[in-house]
Amino acid sequence: MSRPPRTLESVKNPAVQRFRDAATGAGELMLAEGVRLVREALDAGLQVVEAAVSPRLGDDDLRQRLQQTAGSFLDCTDAVLQRMSALESPQGVAVLLARPVYADEDLLRGDLSPLVVVAAGLRDPGNLGAVLRTAEAAGATGCIALRGGADPFRDKAVRGSMGSVFRLPVRHGVESVEAIEFARRHRLQIVVADGGGRRDHTAVDLRRPSLLVVGAEAAGVPAEWLRAADEHVRIPLKAPVESLNVAVAAGVVLFEARRQRL
């Protein structure tokens, strides 16, 4: 049974700041906006802590689902939702979601040959989101975003992932030493994608349980990962191009892994 909505007309209401804080990655909630992303969050079974809709939302079915499932439902004016939003043109719906929490074993998904992606030092949340999207598309079982890099649960990364962050197990804020120990404990070969790699990415056996490490385009992979790597792979590029965007590079290696596994 749906609950009667609370009407929100003041841009000074504390709810506005809650949504704006979540957009930056502050706190334990994450922001999702727009019809498609909100539907994907609901379909993935994430907990909707608070939902805000305005007259601009023309999807009555989505409105009803949010009224029935959200911990708090706010019926807002368009002006209030505009202040809540991190988008230039809000679609009339935004939700605050509880961040999913995963254990190490969740990243393996019980797969006999898991494939976990490590984002090492990626500071651009849009790039990180694109890596998550690519990882899910290629069949990776999980992702680790190392401490010091972008937050996979802030708004730009959520949008960049196009909903993949709702489904792919992701751990954030992990130290390198912890991730390396995780790989050794679960017998995952550490494969570092490095422009100075000794072998082409097609020459390495990626059917084995693997941890694929990708770094920022400018800084590359941190030294501790270069030392820990079992394999250093490079993607052969036609001169004068020297490097690829990290999401593109991750995609090349991940889909080679998928090709080998199929």
Image (cartoon, rainbow, N blue to C red):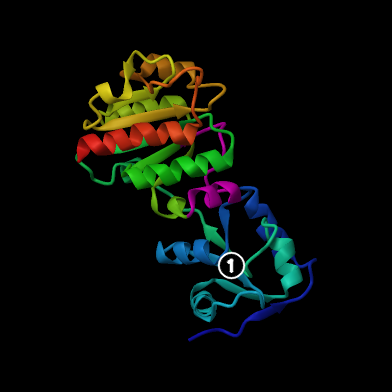
Q: State the residue position of label 1.
A: 50
Q: Is residue 77 magenta?
A: no
Amino acid type, mark 1? Glu
Q: Is residue 82 above or below residue 250?
A: below
Q: Tell which of 91 and 175 is nearer to you.
A: 91
Q: Residue at x 66, y 80 (%)?
A: 6
- Name the spot of residue 172 as percent of width and height, x first: 49, 40
Q: Is residue 146 magenta?
A: yes
Circle 1: is it few (<14), some (14-19), or many (20+) Cα within 10 Å?
Answer: many
Q: Is residue 247 visible?
A: yes
- Name the spot of residue 122 as percent of width and height, x first: 54, 32
Question: Which region is colored magenta?
Answer: 145-162
Q: Is residue 174 visible?
A: no
Quarter of the rendering occupied by the C terminus: top left
Side of 125 relative to 244 (left or right): right
Place residue 195 in its image quadrant: top left
- Name the spot of residue 74 as percent of width and height, x first: 64, 74
Side of 83 relative to 164 (left or right): right
